[in-house]
Image: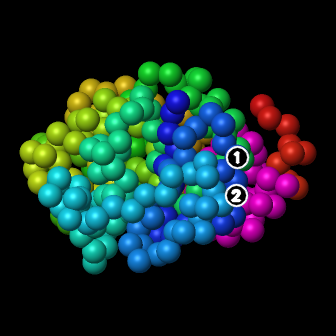
Protein backbone atom coordinates (compact mmCIF):
# COMPACT_ATOMS: atom_id res chain seq x y z
CA UNK A 1 0.00 0.00 0.00
CA UNK A 2 1.30 3.46 -0.89
CA UNK A 3 1.41 6.27 1.61
CA UNK A 4 -0.02 9.78 1.71
CA UNK A 5 1.71 12.17 4.10
CA UNK A 6 0.19 15.57 4.86
CA UNK A 7 2.53 18.14 6.39
CA UNK A 8 0.77 20.55 8.74
CA UNK A 9 1.55 22.78 11.68
CA UNK A 10 -1.55 21.39 13.39
CA UNK A 11 -4.16 18.93 12.03
CA UNK A 12 -7.42 20.33 10.72
CA UNK A 13 -10.71 18.47 11.26
CA UNK A 14 -12.03 19.10 7.75
CA UNK A 15 -8.90 17.52 6.31
CA UNK A 16 -9.03 14.65 8.80
CA UNK A 17 -12.66 13.80 8.06
CA UNK A 18 -11.79 13.56 4.36
CA UNK A 19 -8.60 11.54 4.81
CA UNK A 20 -10.07 9.17 7.38
CA UNK A 21 -12.19 7.55 4.67
CA UNK A 22 -9.27 6.54 2.45
CA UNK A 23 -9.00 2.84 1.56
CA UNK A 24 -6.09 2.62 -0.88
CA UNK A 25 -3.59 4.78 0.99
CA UNK A 26 -2.20 4.70 4.49
CA UNK A 27 -2.52 8.30 5.67
CA UNK A 28 -0.09 10.10 7.97
CA UNK A 29 -0.15 13.69 9.19
CA UNK A 30 3.15 15.17 10.32
CA UNK A 31 2.26 17.64 13.09
CA UNK A 32 4.89 20.35 13.34
CA UNK A 33 3.57 21.94 16.57
CA UNK A 34 5.13 19.80 19.28
CA UNK A 35 2.81 21.20 21.96
CA UNK A 36 -0.47 20.52 20.17
CA UNK A 37 -2.80 18.07 21.97
CA UNK A 38 -3.69 15.21 19.61
CA UNK A 39 -5.83 13.20 22.04
CA UNK A 40 -9.17 13.99 20.37
CA UNK A 41 -7.80 13.45 16.88
CA UNK A 42 -6.36 10.04 17.72
CA UNK A 43 -9.68 9.01 19.26
CA UNK A 44 -11.87 10.13 16.35
CA UNK A 45 -9.74 9.62 13.24
CA UNK A 46 -8.61 6.04 13.69
CA UNK A 47 -7.45 5.56 10.08
CA UNK A 48 -4.88 8.36 10.31
CA UNK A 49 -1.48 8.22 11.99
CA UNK A 50 -0.58 11.52 13.66
CA UNK A 51 3.19 11.91 13.97
CA UNK A 52 5.27 14.26 16.09
CA UNK A 53 9.03 14.18 15.74
CA UNK A 54 11.61 15.31 18.26
CA UNK A 55 13.78 17.94 16.59
CA UNK A 56 16.92 16.37 18.01
CA UNK A 57 16.33 13.28 15.86
CA UNK A 58 16.25 15.42 12.72
CA UNK A 59 19.45 17.22 13.70
CA UNK A 60 21.39 14.08 14.61
CA UNK A 61 20.40 12.43 11.32
CA UNK A 62 21.03 15.45 9.10
CA UNK A 63 17.44 16.31 8.23
CA UNK A 64 17.58 20.10 8.49
CA UNK A 65 17.26 23.21 6.28
CA UNK A 66 14.28 22.02 4.20
CA UNK A 67 12.53 25.38 4.42
CA UNK A 68 13.52 29.06 4.36
CA UNK A 69 12.65 29.91 7.95
CA UNK A 70 14.07 31.21 11.21
CA UNK A 71 13.75 27.65 12.50
CA UNK A 72 16.30 25.00 11.64
CA UNK A 73 13.67 22.24 11.76
CA UNK A 74 10.21 22.41 10.18
CA UNK A 75 7.51 20.05 9.01
CA UNK A 76 9.30 18.98 5.84
CA UNK A 77 12.46 18.08 7.77
CA UNK A 78 10.36 15.94 10.11
CA UNK A 79 8.48 14.26 7.29
CA UNK A 80 11.61 13.36 5.34
CA UNK A 81 13.33 12.15 8.50
CA UNK A 82 10.37 9.98 9.56
CA UNK A 83 9.97 8.26 6.20
CA UNK A 84 13.70 8.15 5.55
CA UNK A 85 14.71 6.63 8.88
CA UNK A 86 11.86 5.44 11.12
CA UNK A 87 9.24 4.18 8.67
CA UNK A 88 10.47 2.73 5.38
CA UNK A 89 7.71 0.18 4.74
CA UNK A 90 6.50 1.53 1.40
CA UNK A 91 7.44 1.71 -2.27
CA UNK A 92 6.12 5.18 -3.02
CA UNK A 93 4.97 8.06 -0.86
CA UNK A 94 2.99 11.21 -1.56
CA UNK A 95 4.04 14.33 0.35
CA UNK A 96 1.63 17.27 0.43
CA UNK A 97 1.36 20.51 2.31
CA UNK A 98 -2.02 21.09 3.91
CA UNK A 99 -3.04 23.85 1.49
CA UNK A 100 -3.04 21.45 -1.47
CA UNK A 101 -6.40 20.43 -2.95
CA UNK A 102 -7.31 17.21 -4.74
CA UNK A 103 -10.76 15.74 -5.23
CA UNK A 104 -10.49 12.26 -3.71
CA UNK A 105 -8.05 9.41 -3.30
CA UNK A 106 -8.85 8.13 -6.78
CA UNK A 107 -7.19 11.29 -8.12
CA UNK A 108 -3.90 10.08 -6.66
CA UNK A 109 -4.52 6.45 -7.54
CA UNK A 110 -5.00 7.22 -11.24
CA UNK A 111 -1.68 9.07 -11.29
CA UNK A 112 -0.02 6.13 -9.55
CA UNK A 113 -1.40 3.74 -12.16
CA UNK A 114 -0.02 5.86 -15.00
CA UNK A 115 3.42 6.33 -13.39
CA UNK A 116 4.19 2.99 -11.77
CA UNK A 117 7.98 3.18 -11.58
CA UNK A 118 8.90 6.88 -11.52
CA UNK A 119 11.11 8.01 -8.66
CA UNK A 120 9.80 11.57 -8.59
CA UNK A 121 6.57 13.14 -9.80
CA UNK A 122 6.24 16.90 -9.52
CA UNK A 123 5.34 20.06 -11.35
CA UNK A 124 7.84 21.32 -13.92
CA UNK A 125 11.42 21.96 -12.85
CA UNK A 126 13.92 24.54 -14.09
CA UNK A 127 17.66 24.94 -14.16
CA UNK A 128 19.17 27.51 -11.81
CA UNK A 129 20.20 29.54 -14.88
CA UNK A 130 16.66 29.66 -16.29
CA UNK A 131 15.51 33.30 -16.30
CA UNK A 132 12.00 32.24 -15.29
CA UNK A 133 13.23 31.00 -11.93
CA UNK A 134 16.52 32.57 -11.00
CA UNK A 135 15.13 35.61 -9.14
CA UNK A 136 12.41 33.88 -7.12
CA UNK A 137 14.74 33.22 -4.20
CA UNK A 138 18.42 33.56 -3.46
CA UNK A 139 20.44 30.55 -4.57
CA UNK A 140 23.34 31.82 -2.47
CA UNK A 141 21.36 30.88 0.64
CA UNK A 142 21.20 27.23 -0.41
CA UNK A 143 24.25 25.06 0.22
CA UNK A 144 24.19 22.07 -2.16
CA UNK A 145 26.92 19.42 -2.10
CA UNK A 146 26.78 18.81 -5.84
CA UNK A 147 28.40 20.65 -8.68
CA UNK A 148 26.11 22.81 -10.78
CA UNK A 149 23.74 22.79 -12.56
CA UNK A 150 21.05 22.87 -9.88
CA UNK A 151 17.31 22.61 -10.41
CA UNK A 152 14.17 23.96 -8.75
CA UNK A 153 10.39 23.92 -8.99
CA UNK A 154 7.17 24.13 -6.99
CA UNK A 155 7.40 21.09 -4.73
CA UNK A 156 4.37 21.60 -2.48
CA UNK A 157 3.05 18.21 -3.61
CA UNK A 158 5.27 15.39 -4.86
CA UNK A 159 5.33 11.63 -5.15
CA UNK A 160 8.65 10.03 -4.23
CA UNK A 161 10.01 6.48 -4.46
CA UNK A 162 11.80 4.59 -1.71
CA UNK A 163 14.90 4.66 -3.92
CA UNK A 164 14.87 8.46 -3.92
CA UNK A 165 14.22 8.59 -0.17
CA UNK A 166 17.29 6.39 0.36
CA UNK A 167 19.42 8.76 -1.71
CA UNK A 168 18.18 11.72 0.35
CA UNK A 169 19.01 9.75 3.51
CA UNK A 170 22.53 9.03 2.29
CA UNK A 171 22.97 12.70 1.39
CA UNK A 172 21.83 13.71 4.89
CA UNK A 173 24.22 11.27 6.56
CA UNK A 174 27.18 12.38 4.47
CA UNK A 175 26.57 16.15 4.58
CA UNK A 176 24.91 16.49 8.04
CA UNK A 177 22.06 18.48 6.47
CA UNK A 178 19.87 18.62 3.40
CA UNK A 179 18.48 21.71 1.66
CA UNK A 180 15.40 23.67 0.55
CA UNK A 181 12.76 21.30 -0.84
CA UNK A 182 12.11 23.36 -3.98
CA UNK A 183 15.69 22.62 -5.00
CA UNK A 184 16.13 19.36 -3.10
CA UNK A 185 13.72 17.11 -4.98
CA UNK A 186 14.54 18.07 -8.58
CA UNK A 187 18.29 18.37 -7.96
CA UNK A 188 18.53 15.00 -6.21
CA UNK A 189 16.52 13.37 -9.01
CA UNK A 190 18.58 14.88 -11.82
CA UNK A 191 21.98 14.36 -10.20
CA UNK A 192 21.25 10.69 -9.54
CA UNK A 193 19.69 9.87 -12.91
CA UNK A 194 16.38 8.93 -11.35
CA UNK A 195 13.16 8.51 -13.31
CA UNK A 196 11.59 11.96 -13.08
CA UNK A 197 8.28 12.90 -14.68
CA UNK A 198 6.07 15.99 -14.66
CA UNK A 199 2.48 14.83 -15.19
CA UNK A 200 -0.04 17.33 -16.50
CA UNK A 201 -2.06 16.73 -13.32
CA UNK A 202 0.66 18.63 -11.42
CA UNK A 203 0.53 21.74 -13.63
CA UNK A 204 -1.54 23.74 -11.12
CA UNK A 205 0.87 23.19 -8.23
CA UNK A 206 2.43 26.64 -7.95
CA UNK A 207 3.54 29.07 -5.27
CA UNK A 208 0.61 31.29 -6.23
CA UNK A 209 -2.64 30.22 -7.84
CA UNK A 210 -2.54 30.09 -11.64
CA UNK A 211 -6.08 28.83 -12.17
CA UNK A 212 -9.64 30.06 -11.85
CA UNK A 213 -11.93 28.25 -9.47
CA UNK A 214 -14.47 27.60 -12.20
CA UNK A 215 -11.88 25.46 -13.99
CA UNK A 216 -11.04 23.12 -11.11
CA UNK A 217 -11.67 19.45 -11.96
CA UNK A 218 -11.32 15.93 -10.57
CA UNK A 219 -8.09 14.89 -12.22
CA UNK A 220 -5.65 17.65 -11.20
CA UNK A 221 -3.91 18.68 -7.99
CA UNK A 222 -4.03 22.35 -6.99
CA UNK A 223 -1.89 24.63 -4.82
CA UNK A 224 -2.36 26.95 -3.07
CA UNK A 225 -5.94 26.58 -1.90
CA UNK A 226 -5.82 27.64 1.74
CA UNK A 227 -9.54 28.01 2.45
CA UNK A 228 -10.72 24.54 3.46
CA UNK A 229 -14.34 25.58 3.08
CA UNK A 230 -13.57 25.95 -0.61
CA UNK A 231 -12.22 22.39 -0.59
CA UNK A 232 -15.57 21.22 0.76
CA UNK A 233 -17.45 23.28 -1.80
CA UNK A 234 -15.47 21.76 -4.67
CA UNK A 235 -16.15 18.23 -3.49
CA UNK A 236 -19.85 18.76 -2.78
CA UNK A 237 -20.95 21.13 -5.54
CA UNK A 238 -18.60 22.07 -8.33
CA UNK A 239 -16.71 19.00 -9.34
CA UNK A 240 -19.41 16.31 -9.54
CA UNK A 241 -20.93 18.18 -12.47
CA UNK A 242 -17.73 18.46 -14.50
CA UNK A 243 -16.71 16.06 -17.24
CA UNK A 244 -13.48 14.18 -16.65
CA UNK A 245 -11.33 14.09 -19.75
On the picture, is 163 further left or further right than 216? left
Estimate how packed mark 2 is, as few (under 14), some (14 to 19) or many (20 or more) residues with alpha carbons within 10 Å. some
Whether residue 226 appears in magenta in the rendering, the answer is yes
On the picture, is 167 further left or further right than 108? left
On the image, which quarter does residue 140 sit in? bottom left
Would you say residue 138 is visible in this rendering?
no
Coloring applied to the structure? rainbow
From the viewer's side, name the closer residue of 164 and 149: 164
Circles 2 and 1: CB distance less than 8 Å?
yes
From the top left corner, tell me how far across and down residue 46 is, in percent.
61, 52
Q: Residue at x 17, y 53 (%)?
A: 61
On the picture, is 15 further left or further right than 146? right
Estimate how packed mark 1 is, as few (under 14), some (14 to 19) or many (20 or more) residues with alpha carbons within 10 Å. some
Tell me the quadrant of the picture where the C terminus can be found: top right
From the top left corner, tell me how far across and down residue 175 is, in percent.
10, 50
| Gap in angstroms between the C-alphas marked 2 and 1 | 7 Å
From the top left corner, tell me how far across and down residue 113 is, in percent.
59, 23
From the top left corner, tell me how far across and down residue 57 is, in percent.
22, 59
Q: Residue at x 72, y 60 (%)?
A: 231
Determine which residue is flagged by label 1: 21
On the image, which quarter does residue 15 sit in? bottom right
Label for residue 17?
A: 2
On the picture, is 63 further left or further right than 88? left
Q: Which residues are magenta?
A: 212-236
Would you say residue 216 is visible in this rendering?
yes
Secondary structure under the numbered disc 2 in the rendered image: helix
Please determine whether, in this image, residue 147 is positioned above or below residue 61: above
From the viewer's side, name the closer residue of 49 and 6: 49
Q: Residue at x 52, y 25 (%)?
A: 115
Amino acid sequence: MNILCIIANIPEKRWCAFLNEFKKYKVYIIVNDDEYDLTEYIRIYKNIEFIKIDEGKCISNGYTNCEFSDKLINGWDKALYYFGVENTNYEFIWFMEDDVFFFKEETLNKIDINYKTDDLLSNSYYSKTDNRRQNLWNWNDINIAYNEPYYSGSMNSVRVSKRMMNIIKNYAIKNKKIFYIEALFPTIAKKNNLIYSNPTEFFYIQNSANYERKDVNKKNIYHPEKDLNIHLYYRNHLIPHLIIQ
